[in-house]
Image: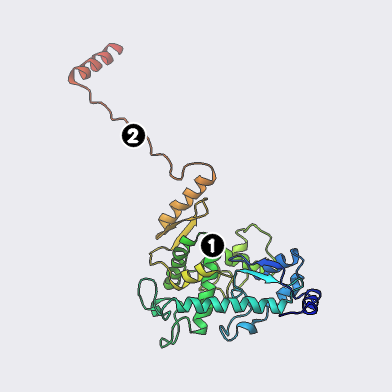
């Protein structure tokens, strides 16, 4: 047991955990840094410097450029004056623990939710003798996809469907056209002013999925368990598009024509109108005139002349 002197030195040394700090699902390293600074826990720059060093995740995803995506969303008990490198190490450790738990609960990680082989997925491992959860390249792609899903919808039940849209587009060679990737790329360059504009969609960033095909170079936020599961097991759908529905969810569609109709629904909802316009009134059928009425009309015309 600790002596009174031990407790004294732990308190004066700032080693007593007394501050709860929460990383929310989908938050970026920039948002985490701002929150740490706002809570007077550390300067934002200290955290960003530590989070820019991918060495903590090199054994898991050697191609990762930063720790973005691998700082697991959770509530952490921090000392009064946390050290940035120790905090990122704690967050990465939590991520790896959760990944192992996902792997253990996912059989061998080699099948999708409908039993199809993972080789059919666009994020499959190149070496089919190992599972996608064991492949460093596939791991990075899974976490990247999960980060897109996390940023696109707050609804857990929608995440497998959003993941299906992205995986379907990847299969077809379509650009993902994911707005959050554009925002993230601009934020990395210090150029995001908000809200997103049409000009932003042409920004020169490797994260801009309107300009570049495939997944972005790495995660655009830190996904939680539900989004990681969705990336591993996308819903089996034909969906290629989705648009907001003003209720925090989305309309999903398989064709551009259907998507355009959903966009109109969204605009109507924004304007305070019903999603679907009212049907046109039935056209009145022209009544057939009887022979007697026809003869009467002819007589009337003759009299008018």
- The foreground one among 1 and 12 is 1
Residue 177 picture location, percent across and down? 52, 65
Residue drawn at x 54%, y 65% is: 150
Residue 18 picture location, percent across and down? 72, 68
Q: Is residue 56 left or right of residue 134?
A: right
* Quadrant of the image occupied by residue 46: bottom right
Residue 168's disc is none
Above or below, 274 relative to 113: above
Above or below, 190 relative to 109: above
The answer to whether one can see residue 188 in this image is no
Q: How many marks?
A: 2
Q: Which residue is mark 2?
A: 282
Residue 50 picture location, percent across and down? 70, 78
Q: Which residue is mark 1?
A: 152
Q: Are marks 1 and 2 in contact (CB under 8 Å)?
A: no
Q: Is the N terminus in the top left, top right, bottom left or bottom right quadrant?
A: bottom right
* Quadrant of the image occupied by residue 223: bottom right
Residue 89 picture location, percent across and down? 65, 79
Above or below, 144 relative to 61: above
Q: Is the C terminus in the top left, top right, bottom left or bottom right quadrant?
A: top left
Residue drawn at x 28%, y 28% is: 286
In space, the residues marked 1 and 2 are separated at their CA atoms by 41 Å
Q: Secondary structure at mark 1?
A: helix
The answer to whether one can see residue 103 in this image is yes
Q: Secondary structure at mark 2?
A: loop
- The foreground one among 43 and 5 is 5
Residue drawn at x 60%, y 82% is: 57
Label 1: how many residues lie within 10 Å, few (<14), some (14-19) or many (20+)?
many
* Foreground: disc 1 or disc 2: 1
Which residue of the protein is positioned furthest toward the top in this rendering? 303
- The foreground one among 162 and 32 is 32
Label 2: how many residues lie within 10 Å, few (<14), some (14-19) or many (20+)?
few
């Amino acid at each position: 047991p600790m002596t009174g002197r031990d407790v004294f030195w732990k308190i004066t040394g700032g080693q007593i955990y007394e501050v709860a700090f929460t990383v929310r699902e989908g938050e970026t390293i920039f948002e985490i840094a701002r929150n740490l600074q706002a809570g007077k826990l550390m300067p934002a720059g200290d955290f960003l410097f530590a989070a820019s060093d991918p060495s903590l995740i090199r054994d898991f995803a050697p191609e990762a450029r930063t720790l973005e995506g691998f700082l697991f969303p959770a509530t952490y008990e921090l000392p009064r004056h946390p050290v940035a490198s120790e905090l990122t190490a704690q967050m990465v450790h939590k991520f790896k623990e959760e990944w192992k738990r996902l792997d253990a609960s996912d059989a061998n990680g080699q099948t999708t939710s409908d039993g199809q082989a993972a080789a059919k997925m666009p994020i499959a491992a190149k070496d089919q003798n190992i599972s996608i959860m064991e492949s460093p390249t596939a791991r990075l792609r899974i976490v990247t996809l999960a980060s897109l899903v996390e940023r696109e919808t707050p609804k857990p039940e929608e995440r497998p469907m959003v993941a299906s849209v992205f995986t379907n587009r990847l299969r077809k060679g379509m650009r993902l056209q994911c707005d959050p990737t554009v925002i993230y790329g601009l934020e990395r360059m210090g150029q995001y002013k908000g809200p997103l504009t049409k000009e932003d969609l042409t920004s020169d960033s490797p994260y801009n999925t309107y300009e570049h095909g495939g997944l972005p170079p790495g995660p655009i936020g830190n996904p939680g368990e539900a989004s990681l599961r969705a990336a591993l097991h996308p819903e089996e759908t034909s969906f290629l598009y989705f648009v907001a529905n003003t209720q925090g969810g989305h309309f999903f569609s398989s064709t551009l024509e259907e998507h355009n109709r959903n966009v109109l629904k969204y605009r109507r909802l924004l304007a305070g109108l019903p999603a679907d316009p009212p049907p046109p009134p039935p056209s009145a059928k022209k009544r057939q005139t009887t022979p007697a009425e026809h003869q009467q009309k002819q007589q009337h015309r003759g009299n008018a002349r």
